[in-house]
Image: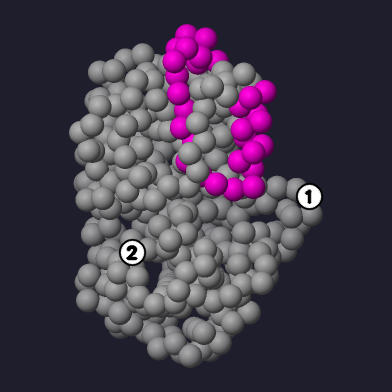
Amino acid sequence: MKLLQTPARFHPYIGGVENHVFYLSKELVEMGHTVKVICADEPQSKTGNVQGIEVERLPYFFKIANTNICLGLPRAILRSDFDVIHTHMPTPWTCDWSILLSRLMGKRSVITIHNDMDKPGFLSKIITDIYLHTIFLLSLSLADKIIIVNEEWEKSFSNTSHILKRYKTKISTSPNGVDSEVFKPLNTARERHALLFVSILDKHHRFKGLGYLLGAIKLVRQSIPDIKLTIVGEGELKDFYIREADDLNIGQCVEFVGAKKQEDLVTLYDRASLFVLPSTEIEGFGIVLLEAMACKTPVIATDTVGVAKDVIQNDCGIVVEPRNSRALADAITAILGNAKLGREMGENGRRLVEEHYSWGTIGRKIESIYKRLMI
């Protein structure tokens, strides 16, 4: 099949949706399909071939709600040759054009919904609500198939589940995955009392809960003075978080190392004693948790994270309520204070990833969806 993917951005941009599209596309190429990606030119990279994937990068003029507005997107789609277009939310501009144009071209369309849609601020909430009940509704009605990465979407997608339920017959669930051949334990010594946090440090990712984690570090430091938190990521809020750490008098315990390449991330996961994702709002999935677990690193997450249920059921870490630095601190202390427990959780996490979250398994499931659409 000839497949067209339309994320807002693509590799080497680092993010959950971008990683999902990259690994899925790579898996589909290995299965023998032709895959093209149309995306914004962020970060600036050449149009061309990326590990067998044809990539067309378009200039963008500005962003709305973290969505690159590429005026050349409709033309790029119209001149592409494909059997199925696969687009992704929550990036409305790319998603809505992809669904509409595929219908006009007589092609099949799939939309993967990675997160619930809700925006902070009174005006943003009003605009989002209008969009959800107009253009988004139209896209859902025109799409041939809807995939949601969170199997708990009916109860966790508080802002969109009532809309999605109207199209329940179109919906399948398929999780994110992780390349367990890349993200794997390196069998190096773990750094004692070392925590890791990975995110983009911008206003759109404040829901990752870094502020609450910094508050937890201040509490944990009272009983574990040598605790260390490594923060991976760049963004306009980086200096804000640096000041916040200094204001909490934990600056000497916190290291901001900037954005990291994949191979460097693996090393950081492998060295950490614990990985923490304290999201404050609905996290459609939480792919960084899979990456950490694939490296046998125990995890702490909040119950807003899509993979939290598996973390609990498979004893891969601890799940706490969101927006609670004290609960985070207690969970951190419990794992760091029991090395045997941390090792067991790490082993359980690796086993879970290998059995349920390999891209080979997920790629075959997505491929079967495409094939059914072509009948």
Residue farthest toward the right in the current orientation of the protein: 123
Q: Quadrant of the N terminus?
A: bottom left
- Circle 2 SS class: helix
Quarter assignment of residue 35: bottom left
How crowded is the residue under tag 2: few (<14 C-alpha within 10 Å), some, or many (20+)? many
Q: Which residue is mark 1?
A: 122
Say which residue appears at 37% left-offset and 63% top-offset.
22
Q: x, y (%) of residue 122? A: 78, 49
In terms of sequence position, does the residue under pointer 1 or pointer 2 come before the other?
Answer: 2
The answer to whether residue 353 is magenta is: no
Q: Nearer the viewer, residue 172 or 234?
A: 234
Q: Which mark is residue 32?
A: none
Is any part of residue 79 visible from this angle? yes
Say which residue appears at 44% left-offset and 15% top-offset.
226
**Residue type, label 2:** Leu
Q: Nearer the viewer, residue 167 or 34?
A: 34
The answer to whether residue 234 is magenta is: yes
Is any part of residue 290 visible from this angle? no
- Circle 1 SS class: helix
Quarter assignment of residue 316: top left
Q: Which residue is mark 2?
A: 24
Q: Magenta stretch?
A: 219-247
Q: Nearer the viewer, residue 318 or 339?
A: 339
> Does the CB distance between marks 1 and 2 fall below 8 Å?
no
